Image (cartoon, rainbow, N blue to C red):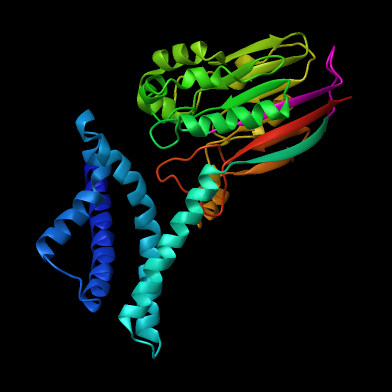
Amino acid sequence: MPKVIGGILLISIYSALTFYLGWGLRQWLVAMEWFRYPILYWLVLYIIAFSIIIGRLHESLRVFSIISNYWMFIFEYGLLLCMAAHLIIWSSPFKNVQIIGSIAIAMLFVLSVVGSYLAYSPVVRHLEITMDKKSSNLESLRVVVASDFHLGVLSHKKHLQRFVTLSNEAKPDIVFLVGDIVDDDPKWFVQEGMADVMKKLTSTYGVYGVLGNHEYYGKKIPEFVEEMENANVKILRDETIRIDNALLLTGQEDRTNKDRKQLDALKLTDDLPWFVMNHTSNNINTPAKMGVDFHMSGHTHKGQLWPNQYITARVFELDYGYKMKGKMHTLVSSGFGFWGPPMRIGSRSELWVVDINFH
């Protein structure tokens, strides 16, 4: 019962905010003398607002899922711009709705263009660290770390090719894919033949990945793991492996899996550098105390859209970038892809190239 009440309350607030945004847009359309057919206007607005639900009803309604992704961007920044416009109108002598509204619409368009560029033009972040641990047969190691591809309709095959190109240019010894590789359902990965692109990744010791929360949302984990195997990506599920007697690599299940093993059950006694992939960086104290040498996560997207990064910074001890936690090197990536709108403001699609020196 509390969940039902909470759901009703959430839908009511969302509907009210949608109405406020629609009312603000209507004011501008009226001022421009472009407003027609009020019933159709509000009907279309609320269909778009609830397209995220409509798109899940049937495969034939898939277009609504795409619409909902863009709506997320319009909803967040539309509200911010609408409130800013009303604040100017109500608190300043300048009352021209036509001009203020037109500026707000223009800003929303500019933000969408900038956001699309930041989402689809990934950058390579470089990091060099010295690890206080010796590898039996390595003096140094170059790794590529990436997460949150959300491969599907909008984070598509062409975007994956960008990753493969940038990763191969770095000539890594090993590649780590730290969860949310596909956007819920792996069917688009299969339909678009993305495995053929992923297979082109080159490295000395291979490509390894873990599950993220969105792989669990898709509820097709066996199919996903099999497809990754076809793409030459080894998915680690609560297991630790030795790689060429050079390092230990642990892949933890995402915390979405309530039955996942604790990290101490995955620890081996070998005195080799210990690398851990865990999609969500909700707890970095435990791996630091247990002697993990390099801990990799994603999930946060660095908020993806400003000002969301201020929320993730409060939720996570480390929501983005590099941090030394005791003797443990910790890295959280903002992701190579995106979730929802194919846009980023205040963050950027990225992969990390980390040069590790052992001593």
Q: Dividing the image into 4 quarters, which one contains the C terminus?
A: top right
Q: Is residue 85 left or right of residue 207?
A: left
Q: Is residue 204 left or right of residue 20?
A: right
For the N terminus, the quadrant is top left
Residue 294 visible? The answer is no
Quarter of the rendering containing residue 357: top right
Where does the image place residue 77, in percent across and percent down from the top left?
40, 60
Report the side of 60 relative to 326 (left or right): left
- Magenta stretch in the rendered image: 131-147
Residue at image point 21% right, 40% down: 54
User: Which of the pair 77/309 is nearer the observer?
Assistant: 77
Q: Does residue 275 appear left or right of residue 48 in this picture?
A: right
The one nearer the camera, 86 or 273, is 86
Instruction: Tell me where residue 332 appears, x and y as whole percent.
Output: 62, 38
Percent x, y of residue 201: 61, 20
Q: Is residue 159 above or below residue 201?
A: below
The vertical placement of 223 against 348, above or below, is: above
**How far across and down, in percent of the image, does residue 127 sit?**
75, 38
Using the image, determine if residue 24 lies above or below residue 144.
below
Residue drawn at x 70%, y 31% is 288
Quadrant in which residue 358 is drawn = top right
* Count of picture labels: 0
The residue sitting at the bottom extreme is 93
Is 287 part of what is drawn in magenta?
A: no
- Front residue of this view, candidates 127 and 261: 127
Q: Nearer the viewer, residue 120 or 308?
A: 120
Seen at 20% across and 31% down, the residue is: 60
Q: Is residue 145 magenta?
A: yes
Q: Vertically, is 352 above or below 223?
A: below
